[in-house]
Amino acid sequence: MNTSQGSLPSDFTVRPGEVTVDLPEAPDAGVYFIGRIHTPWTERKSCPKNPAGSDAVCTIELEERYVPGLKEVETCSHLVLLYWMDRAPRNLVRQVPGHYGVQRGTFALRSPARPNPIAMSVVKLLGIDGNKLSVVGLDCLDGTPLLDIKPYFASIDSVPNAKVGWREQG
Ligand SMILES: C[S@@+](CC[C@H](N)C(=O)[O-])C[C@H]1O[C@@H](n2cnc3c(N)ncnc32)[C@H](O)[C@@H]1O
């Protein structure tokens, strides 16, 4: 584990109490970005911390080659979107989020900074026009790459009594 600042995107710094690691020399797999997410936010400070923080309408611009994959997506009220936090560092294993001020493990947090900076949100689908999907429920910067779109199944994905203990303790 390292406690010094490695090479990080300029908008992120290692805060006191945070811990970084050396990443492997090469990734184990590659991904295809299937589109881009257009949102009103260009800076992290104005971006919502989670999807509940905004009712802004955002646009998913899917690459044309993947449009056939949208068949019957219009029947879904809600979708799970997976996206790539392209401006986040990947080497933090302990973090001190500014809004909590307490050190926690990366895998106990929804921070964008993680070895694979994959984020997720359940969004409300407003409509589809060609390769563009209008959705509500995002918390990412304009231009964030899209990894995947899946139907949200309330019967499978909803766990109403799930807990995050540290959040309940304050
Ligand atoms: C706390 S994360 C939550 C992401 C997602 N809803 C999740 O739970 O996986 C949201 C924050 O990530 C940051 N962020 C948004 N888009 C980003 C991007 N493309 N690269 C790096 N950080 C980003 C912003 O500070 C935003 O407030």
Image: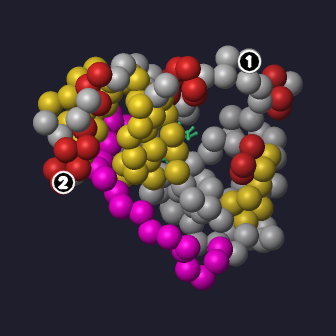
Secondary structure type for disc 2: helix
Name the residue type under label 2. Arg
Which portion, as a residue range, is magenta?
23-42
Q: How far apart are marks 2 and 1 (CA)?
A: 40 Å
Residue at the image position 32 percent from the left and 42 percent from the top: 37
Quadrant holding the N terminus:
bottom right
Residue, disc 2: 65
Q: Where is residue 148 in the image (x, y as percent from the top left)?
A: 39, 46
In the image, 47 versus 24, the foreground residue is 24
Give neighbour class at mark 1: few <14, some 14-19, many 20+ (Cα, 10 Å): few
Residue at the image position 51 percent from the left and 40 percent from the top: 120
Q: Where is residue 19 in the image (x, y as percent from the top left)?
A: 77, 61
Q: Is the magenta stretch mostly helix, strand or loop?
A: loop
In the depicted structure, whether residue 121 falls above or below residue 32: above
Residue, disc 1: 161
- Residue 105 inside the magenta-drawn segment: no
Residue at the image position 45 percent from the left and 57 percent from the top: 86
Q: In which quarter of the image is residue 30?
A: bottom left
In the depicted structure, whether residue 84 falls above or below residue 165: below
Secondary structure type for disc 1: loop
In the image, 170 versus 63, the foreground residue is 63
Q: Where is residue 159 in the image (x, y as percent from the top left)?
A: 66, 22
Question: Is 168 left, or right, of 82 in this rendering?
Answer: right
